Image (cartoon, rainbow, N blue to C red):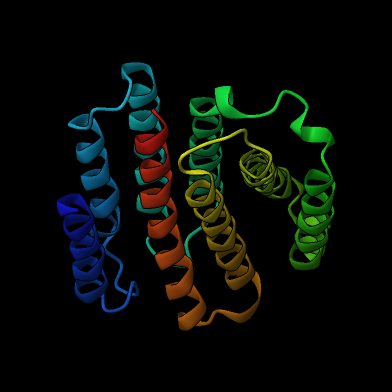
Amino acid sequence: MIHIIFYAGAVFLTYLETLGFDKNSKLLMAVPILILLGITIKSKINDNIRNQMIAVFLFGAASIYSQSNFRTSLPIPAISLTISNIIYFFSYKSLVKPNFYSEKVTIFWTFLTFLGFFAILQDLIVAIPFLTIILFALFFSHLLLITSSSTIRSSDAKFVRIVGNFSGFLSTFLFVFNSFHTHSMLIHQISRFSFYLSNFLMFTANERDF
């Protein structure tokens, strides 16, 4: 319970100090994830899983640090977050059904992800193909997390993991959409809060299961 209050307080203070996540303060934006990393180090999670979660939060902190605000270029944070997502998948892979990719939920989310991907990046595909590939890999990593957690075997934290992974997808979708379309501060703030929520729920899920 204490670590929940501590982490939530760090996110709230970051929100205040960056004037609603608008101020260009990269280190402050990464502080909540670094605090979560410290909580992970002191946790009683299985050693192997804990090491993987440390890597997840290191890359997650690198991602949010390199973003700073929605006007920042995307390649470095996108690559960092993609790596973070993939490492996180392997941290709970032992709980996932072997053939999860053949489930109906996987087909549904694959269709929905590609639809959203092309809807917000159709102009970018021709203009900047390299960035398109990087963002495609990022969306695919979120798809992997959502579908695998949705088809997971019996788990103490299945719902927590699903909500966390979906929050991560929502954060990325809104961030990318905002970067190329609306440039709305409200959407940017929702994206950032979703990112912090996602990381905390990712930690909570693995803490309960391992």
Residue 205 placement: quadrant: top left
Residue found at x 18% / y 64%: 9
Counting from the top left corner in percent of width and height, residue 195 is at 44, 58
Q: Is residue 87 visible?
A: yes
Is residue 27 in view?
Answer: no
Query: Percent x, y for residue 127?
Result: 78, 58
- Left/right placement of residue 154 relative to residue 63 reads right
Locate residue 100 relative to residue 111 in the image: left or right: left
Q: Quadrant for residue 38, please give it.
A: top left
Picture layout, residue 60 above or below residue 54: below
Q: Say if 23 sits above or below 115 in the image.
A: below
Q: Is residue 197 left or right of residue 125?
A: left
Residue 210, percent from left and from top: 38, 27
Instruction: Using the rendered view, name the quadrant where residue 118 is placed.
Output: bottom right
Q: Residue at x 76, y 63 (%)?
A: 116
Please state which of residues 200 and 67 is positioned toward the viewer in this rendering.
200
Q: Is residue 189 above or below residue 6?
A: below
Q: Nearer the viewer, residue 102 or 198?
A: 102
Above or below, 75 relative to 117: above
User: Which residue occupies 48% across, 27% down?
Assistant: 91
Task: Name the residue located 26 percent from the left edge and 39 percent from the top edge.
Answer: 37
Q: Nearer the viewer, residue 1 or 118?
A: 1
Instruction: List the single residue furthest toward the top.
Output: 48
Residue 177: horizontal and vertical position, in percent? 64, 69
Query: Seen in the image, is 179 located left or right of residue 29?
Result: right
